[in-house]
Image (cartoon, helix red, strand yellow):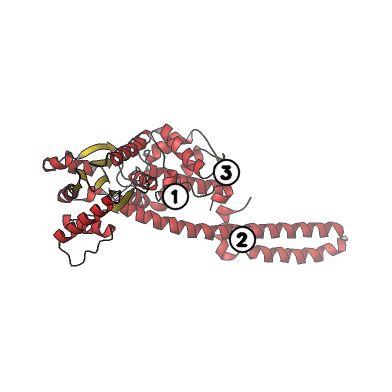
Amino acid sequence: MYEAYFGFTDKPFRLSPDPRFFFASPHHEKAASYLQYGLSSGEGFIVVTGPIGSGKTMIARHLLANLDDSVVAVQIATTCLSPDELVRLVAAKFDIPVEGLSKADILKRLEQCFLSLHAKGLQVLLLVDEAQNLPPETVEELRMLSNFQQDDKPLLQSFLLGQEELKAIIARPDMEQFRQRVIASCHLQSFDCEQTQEYIEHRLQQVGWEGKPALNEAIFSMICEQTAGIPRKINILMDRVLLFAFLEEMEEVDEDAISQVLAEMGEEFSGALSSSSMGEVNRDNAIGSDEGAARFLPQRTWSDQEAEKLLNTLDNVTEVLDKVIERKIATIRYLDTQIIKKRRLYQATVQSEPMSTHHHHDMENSGALAEDESILGDDDEACAPTMTAR
């Protein structure tokens, strides 16, 4: 809704990962480089871990968006799959019918598929998102799939992305064989204050931001503190900040605006938004320490897959509500304009006519004004106090 007002070409802080907005912080650039290195080597596992909302899926989307035609890549976001279920899911991703087939038969068809792609000069890549949900025996099944080889090179390469629990799975004593296949791994860190500012400005620049609204330098350390430097949390907060700036017709976003938005979010969501989309975070660092802001803190951990599904739904709901609010604002502005015109007409009429007729016009125009103002009705009164046009 605020895009047109600020001259943006799109919403800069959408919650769903979009590779157009990939921000190469040192940690994210390192992770992306590791994935590229793994792809060029054509063998071994690459493991990327990080907190919920830190940008793991964004890195995967960025990689997929920049692959050339020589790579056949599929991505799976896992729940708690058994080894057999994983094999069936991978086969389905490569359009291999699996109904009625045993695991051994599916594995044979997978190998034939990979050999056929290899013969065409194609590299096969499997991206496993939410890999922390896999039991150790299913992670081991991925290693077994990498045993399909031709000319001493694996026919399938796998990259694993997951939350910090994935590191504990790989570190188990019985995962030694898997660890030996890992050629690189990295852990995503949250942004510091400088990176938070660069991230916000980067996303705004991608949609044509030219300084409207201006961003006071003091807000970035505040945003970093309140969001713990987690990209998804920054997106949630900044989207609301821009909506607030639009409704209040602000030329500059300052600390007071951030404080008001945080207060509103705490009152409206009472922790529900954070718990659904941000997972567990450090309560000493995230979304402040006072009682009002504490309600914005998470209460449970959701997977990135669950969070992304919910956030996509919220995006859709937001678009519908934006259109409704736009219509309300347009109606209010139209009525304000009509009322002003009526008043000016009334004043001009009073000034140009004899005193004896003033009382008659007073009655007529007062009635007309009352009629115009009543058009707002009960339906618009609810939003009028907070969205009256200036």
Residue at the left extreme? 174
Element carrying mark 1: loop
Residue at the right extreme? 354
x and y, in percent, of residue 194 in the image = 43, 32
The residue identified by callout 1 is 14
x and y, in percent, of residue 300 in the image = 28, 50
In the rendered structure, find residue 381 and report the number of the disc placed on it: none
Q: Give the crowd class for mark 3: few <14, some 14-19, many >=20 residues within 10 Å.
A: some
Mark 3 or 1, nearer chain start? 1
Give the CA separation, mark 2 to mark 3: 21 Å
The residue identified by callout 3 is 250
Q: Amino acid at mark 2?
A: Thr
x and y, in percent, of residue 103 in the image = 15, 60
Give the label, 1 or 2, closer to the camera. 1
Q: Considering only vertical position in the picture, is 381 above or below 118?
A: below
Q: Considering only vertical position in the picture, is 235 above or below 113?
A: above
The quarter of the displayed image where residue 62 is located: top left
Q: Amino acid at mark 3?
A: Met
x and y, in percent, of residue 223 in the image = 43, 38
Residue beneath the point at 39% across and 49% down: 17
Q: Give the crowd class for mark 1: few <14, some 14-19, many >=20 residues within 10 Å.
A: some
The residue identified by callout 2 is 331
Give the label, 3 or 1, closer to the camera. 1
Dots 3, 1 in contact, CB < 8 A: no
Q: Amino acid at mark 1?
A: Arg
Mark 2 or 3, nearer chain start? 3
Give the CA separation, mark 1 to mark 2: 27 Å
Dots 1, 2 in contact, CB < 8 A: no
Q: Considering only vertical position in the picture, is 38 above or below 114?
A: above
**Res. 138 visible in picture:** yes
